[in-house]
Every structure is written in C-alpha cells, then in structure tokens.
Amino acid sequence: MGFPEEFSFHTACQLLVPSIGGGSAASPSPSFFSLSWVCGQGCLSPEMFHKAHQFSASISEEAEDVSEEAPLRDRSHIEKTLMLDEDKPADDYSVVLQRLRKIYHSSIKPLEQSYKYNELRQHEITDGEITSKPMVLFLGPWSVGKSTMINYLLGLENTRYQLYTGAEPTTSEFTVLMHGPKLKTIEGIVMAADSARSFSPLEKFGQNFLEKLIGIEVPHKLLERVTFVDTPGIIENRKQQERGYPFNDVCQWFIDRADLIFVVFDPTKLDVGLELEMLFRQLKGRESQIRIILNKADNLATQMLMRVYGALFWSLAPLINVTEPPRVYVSSFWPQDYKPDTHRELFLKEEISLLEDLNQVIENRLENKIAFIRQHAIRVRIHALLVDRYLQTYKDKMTFFSDGELVFKDIVEDPDKFYIFKTILAKTNVSKFDLPNREAYKDFFGINPISSFKLLSQQCSYMGGCFLEKIERAITHELPGLLGSLGLGKNPGALNCDKTGCGETPKNRYKKH
C-alpha cells in the first residue's frame, strides 16, 4: 500500500497510536509516548498501519459520541475576571490617542523619514496602529488547541462564529478576530487596502500571503477591547515550510505589534524542530510578553503531568535566554468539563491567572501604547545619530583626490576603526545595549547612498525647529507628560487641549512613585 509523498508516516502514527492505546488524538493515553517513539522509528508496517487506521476510525466515532454528551464547564469566572458582565460604557481614549498621534507626526516621523529608518528596521507605524486595540497573538505547533482556546475564551462553541478545529492541521490562514456590529468575514486584500486599520503594511508580503489572511468581525464584548490573532500551526516538516509567502517575516510583523503572546503546547508535541527554534529566535527581546501554555493537561495523570511539565522546560530551556523562567500556565482550555480525578482546582486557578494577565494588558492599553511609541522614538534617534556620524566621518576623510566610494566602503566595513559607535556612546546619552547591529548598516548603506543624507545640524528650519531637538523633547517631556496626564482622572476622555495642550509642549507631569 503506497502513501502520498507529502503524507508523513511519523505524523500519521502520532494521530493513530493514541487511539490504539485507548485514547484519542485530543486525549492521549499514557502509552502514547512510548508507542509514538516506536512508530517514529518506522517499526509499523504499512499493512499494520492500514489496520490501525480502520480501528482508529471506529474508536474516533465512539469518542465523538462521548464528547458530544460531555458536560460543559461553568464560564462565570471568565465573565467575572474579564469584567464582561459589567454594563459600564467603554472608556473614551480618543483625546489621548489624538495627542499621541500628533506627537508622533510632528516630533518623530520627520526624523524617521529623513533618515529612512523604516528601511533599516522595516517597522512603519501607521495611524491605525496607534489607535488600534491591544493584540493577543497565539503561536505554537499544529493541533495543540489554539483555535479551540479562542473559541472557549469568546464562548463561540457550537455557534456560527466558531473557528474550525480538529485533530489534523486545520488553520492554514492568519485569522484576525475583531469586533463588529454583526458577523462579517473580511478578505486579506481588503484589510490591507483599508488604511484605517492597522494591517495595511502587510501588503508588502505579497498577494500569496494576503490570500492566507482573513479577518472576522464578531459582535462580542471582549473584542471591543482586544484583538485576537490565530496563526497557522508550526509543522516540523520541510515540505510544509514551502508556504508560498515569507512565513517567518509575517510572524515577526505580528510579534513586533503584539501586546501579549501565547505560545501553546500540548503533551503530545513537546519536541522542538527548526521552525519552532526559528520562532523563538524571533521572540528574543519580547520575553515579557510571552506566556507559555501547556494545554490539555487534564488528559494526564499526576505523575505523567509532572514528567511532561519537566520535558517542556527541558525543550524550551536552550531557546529562552533569560535569567527568570517564563510564566507557564497548565490547564485545559476548551468548553468541556475537566476529566474526573484530575486537579480541577489547580487548573481553574491557572486559567484565572491567565485571564488576569489578559485583563491587565487590556487595562494598561494606553500606557503600553505610549511606551511603545517612546521606545520607537529612541530607536529612531539612535539611528539618526549613527547616520549623522557616518556622514560626518565620510566628509572628514574625503579629500580632493579621494575616491568617495572607496573611502565610504572602508568606513562601513570597519566602523570601529573610525570610532563610529564609540563616539555615539561618548557624546550622547545612548546605552550600548540599545545600539543596533553594525552589520545592518552595511545593507542599509548598500541601498541608500551616504550622499542622499544631510547632517543633523542641517535639519533645522526657522519656523519648524530642529528635527533632533523635537524628537528629544518628545522622548524626555511630551511622551512622559502624556503618560503622567493619565493619572489626572479616571476617565481619559475628560482630558482636553486646555489641560494637556494638544500639539504644544506640555508640562512634565510624569512622576515616579
């Protein structure tokens, strides 16, 4: 019996063996781990595999009948923790966001455009991104329960709104769940063309990706305050990596903009392959936003759960280079009640802790947004200072008989020889930990000739002032002042231009407590 070339024999065994051992793909038996290893060694003949497939089909039908009759768990803790049962109107953040947008356009963007920062980091901030809701990103291997978890948090099970789930890889698109007055599906090409949304920069990843991007508007109270992004599961199969679009670059785009990142695992998929390793490299620097989730935990006995928990840390330890271990939530995120004779109190407390994390991100929306814009401004300032230093060194080394191209090539190849970065550290209040990679500027100046830039001292006008002074004022006064002004009242909408001086330099009300 032959098998299709793209069908992984090892993957098939992983789906079938749990059923042979008395479980299902969603609820593996304790014998899963040893039997899965045996199948991975290719010890199962095609004839035996075919028989196992038939037996698995009958077991799966019985399991589906049982799951349909399984009692649903209480959802009151979700409503209470996320405050979805409160009828108070949503806070009006429009005035604060309008001021934040003015600070960005008047004080940060001019320097950003003048020194082409977007071509170095490829992170263009749009008005839609400034005013967007917090984004929660779901990442992880295939069929670990990412889509099921979203359905559970939003209460979409058995409704026409629910995301499709299954034991096989089901999510092949990047799915963005947003709030809307009625159920509506939005094609990726429409989302990218709408400048009012925060997804217009995704157009740069090509039409093949836009066909794999879909937006769903759902009339749900939680989505009034947050946006969920479901991603295709990671499949450790070289052929599956040929997706037709730059998958890693798209993931990086969402990672850079996510306020909270859930990396989901289940007891059957703890191994780390090349694609998952690449994903954790992309998460470097965002450790504070990462939450690890060990899903489907009620399928395991206590001893096996402890072993799986340790195996998860063992697999992830080389990938997360931080002194403090990441927060790991152990529970089962789906609507059915916990399995009998399991640690339901522990799982419920873990679930409530995760919901509190999510609620904190929602409550700190404005603070996080202002901090994000300020961090962006610091990076733009450092980039402008470096380009200015490269240009000044170039002008100093040029003589009447010099070959400009060779002179600048020598500077770019060995910037330390000309004290480019050391000068920035010595003459400006820039941390050495914030300096970008030297290699990045080889590519940057390969595309952008040094002659296309002006010195910072020449970026001044009588009416508009100097670009560098404006961005430094935004970093040290305007943005901290806007952050401090949030404490003037519980209702952010109460702020007005008389108090905060929209567009003018505000007083620094930021105080450390």
Image (cartoon, rainbow, N blue to C red):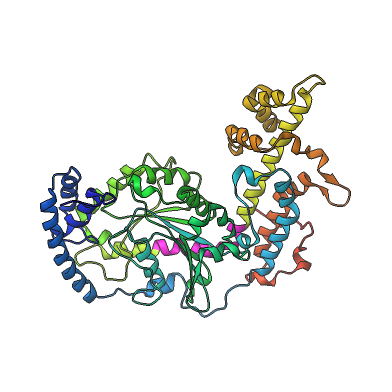
Q: Position of residue 35 (x, y in %)?
A: 15, 49
Q: Position of residue 180 (x, y in %)?
A: 52, 75
Displayed quadrant of residue 139: bottom left
Residue closest to the far top: 401
Q: Is residue 288 left or right of residue 370?
A: left
> What segment is highlighted magenta in the picture?
353-369
Q: In terms of depth relative to the viewer, which is nearer, 154 or 42?
A: 42
Residue in view at x 40 percent, y 69 percent: 153
Residue 367 among those drawn in magenta: yes
Residue in view at x 34 percent, y 43 percent: 273
Quadrant for the C terminus in the image: bottom right
Location of residue 273 with respect to 259 vertically, above or below: above
Q: Position of residue 460 (x, y in %)?
A: 83, 45
Residue in view at x 79 percent, y 59 percent: 504
Residue closest to the far right: 462
Residue in view at x 38 percent, y 48 percent: 241
Q: In terms of depth relative to the viewer, which is nearer, 180 or 503?
A: 180
Residue 199 among those drawn in magenta: no
Count of residue discs: 0
Q: Is residue 346 left or right of residue 201?
A: left
Q: In terms of depth relative to the viewer, which is nearer, 475 or 37?
A: 37
Viewer can see residue 301 = no
Viewer can see residue 314 = yes
Could you tell me what secondary structure mostly forms the magenta stretch?
Answer: helix
Q: Is residue 7 left or right of residue 396?
A: left
Q: Position of residue 251 (x, y in %)?
A: 47, 51
